[in-house]
Image (cartoon, rainbow, N blue to C red):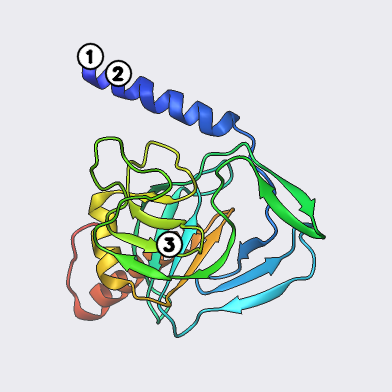
Amino acid sequence: MKKIVSALLFIAVVTSIVNATEYRKHRVNIKALSATKFELTDVNHKNPHIKDFSGKDFIVVSVREPGSDGQMYAVDRDGTIWWHGKISSGAGGGHLEKKNGKLVPVGGHETNNNVFKILAKRRFHMSKTHPAANGVNNMDFELQFTQDGQALHLGHTAAMSHGCIHVGRQDIAPLFKWAHIGMPVVVMRGHYNQFLKKEVEQFKEDIREYDAETGAKSEKI
């Protein structure tokens, strides 16, 4: 019982920290318009353009911040969300500063918003920037998507990161096997899980129609 209470208290503390932390603005803002279509705007939510990934396999990460899902989604080329799982992302506290005419992030560890591509795929890896003191690999199942080392990898989903996306073992293993170099990775603030819910409801409706046509009676979903 003590272990359960301690675990619940730990989760509550972590959640309160996440909700209380301030997170910086991003040079790119992304809004999901459908399961495969996204609107990208600038830091002031202006100059929109559309990215459509229909016909492509891709990954969506809705970061673990207030107003987002804290989930990763694997989307097949037919637009089906075939896998999803809990994640944690970069700790907050940063801000944008203008340097040499460009907005650059300063401080904090927020995971960057943008559409990326997988640059490297490593089954076993140790972070060069933040190596583990005990010498044990701390970035296994790595899917790197930025030049400065941000990646999806095996990690503790209850702990915020230095910018990477932590994924649990039950989710990162199938994601790693499926993903490939060059695969798009959409990292966003905001919600995406509405498309998963819609997909599940459509599946339930398909089952009901099938049962009606065949006279069969499926188990309750």
Residue shown at 37% from the left, 63% from the top:
143
Quadrant housing residue 211: bottom left
Task: Tell me which amino acid carries mark 3.
Answer: Leu
Residue, disc 2: 6
Q: Which residue corresponds to the image point at 63% horizontal and 63% vertical from the top-left?
A: 31
The answer for how far apart the CA atoms under marks 1 and 3 are is 36 Å
Q: Residue furthest bottom?
A: 55
Q: Quadrant of residue 133?
A: top left
Left or right for 21, reference 183: right
Circle nearer the N terminus (3, 2): 2
140 vs 6: above or below: below
Quarter of the image with the C terminus is bottom left
Rendering coords of residue 121 (x, y %): 33, 68
Residue 116 placement, left or right of 73: right
Disc sitting over residue 2 in the figure:
1
Secondary element at image label 1: helix
The residue nearer to you, when weighing 30 against 33, is 30
Cα separation between marks 3 and 2: 32 Å
Label 1 or label 3, whichever lies nearer to me, is: 1
Q: Position of residue 43 (x, y in %)?
A: 75, 57
Residue at which label 3 appears? 196
Residue drawn where x is 25% and y is 69% of the image: 177
Q: Amino acid at mark 1?
A: Lys
Secondary element under disc 3, as helix, strand or loop, is: helix
Residue lying at the far right in this picture: please name it: 101
Observer-nearest of 130 and 155: 130
Q: Is residue 128 above or below residue 117?
A: above
- Residue 10 spot, x, y in % from top left: 37, 23
Amino acid type at mark 2: Ser
Is disc 3 in contact with disc 2, using a CB cutoff of under 8 Å? Answer: no
